[in-house]
Image (tube, rainbow, N blue to C red):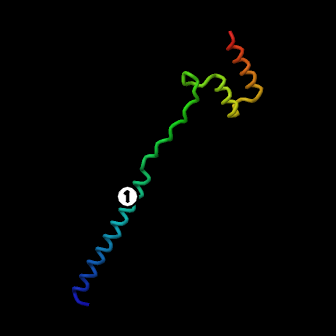
Amino acid sequence: MSGWGWFGMSIGMLLFTALLVFGGVLLVRALDRSSSRPAPPAPPAPPAPPTGVGRPSAEQVLADRFARGEIDDEEYRKRLAALRDTARP
């Protein structure tokens, strides 16, 4: 092999190594960019049921707590009766 053959192989090896390094850098940057993206915004909260002022009534809050299991049937009935008794003048 002549001198130009060795020169061509050396240049080819340098270009191949540079291509591998460049590809690695691009891959790392692409992976880093995808992990540093901000999270998408949360969906808007569902609208509250209309009760005049925009807030749920005391009976609705009590019913929601009962539906979620925060209070039992006996406590729900007792508090509902207390709410309805205080609502009357």
Residue drawn at 34 percent across, 67 percent down? 21
Type of amino acid under label 1: Arg
Question: In which quarter of the view is residue 14 placed?
Answer: bottom left
Q: Position of residue 58 (x, y in %)?
A: 64, 22
* Left or right side of 53 for 33: left
Q: Quadrant of the N terminus?
A: bottom left
Residue drawn at 68 percent across, 34 percent down? 68
The crowd level at tag 1 (other Cα within 10 Å; few <14, some 14-19, many 20+) is few
Residue furthest to the left:
3
Q: Position of residue 26 (x, y in %)?
A: 36, 62
Residue linked to disc 1 = 29
Residue sitting nearer the eye, 37 or 19: 37
Q: 46 above or below 7?
A: above
Q: Position of residue 28 (x, y in %)?
A: 39, 60
Residue drawn at 32 percent across, 74 percent down? 16
* Left or right side of 34 for 7: left
Residue furthest to the top:
89
Q: 36 above or below 55?
A: below
Residue sitting nearer the eye, 34 or 88: 88
Q: Quadrant of the C terminus?
A: top right
Question: In which quarter of the view is residue 47 placed?
Answer: top right
Residue drawn at 58 percent across, 24 percent down? 51
Residue sitting nearer the eye, 37 or 87: 87
Residue sitting nearer the eye, 69 or 35: 69
Q: Position of residue 8 (x, y in %)?
A: 25, 82
Which secondary structure lies at badge 1? Answer: helix
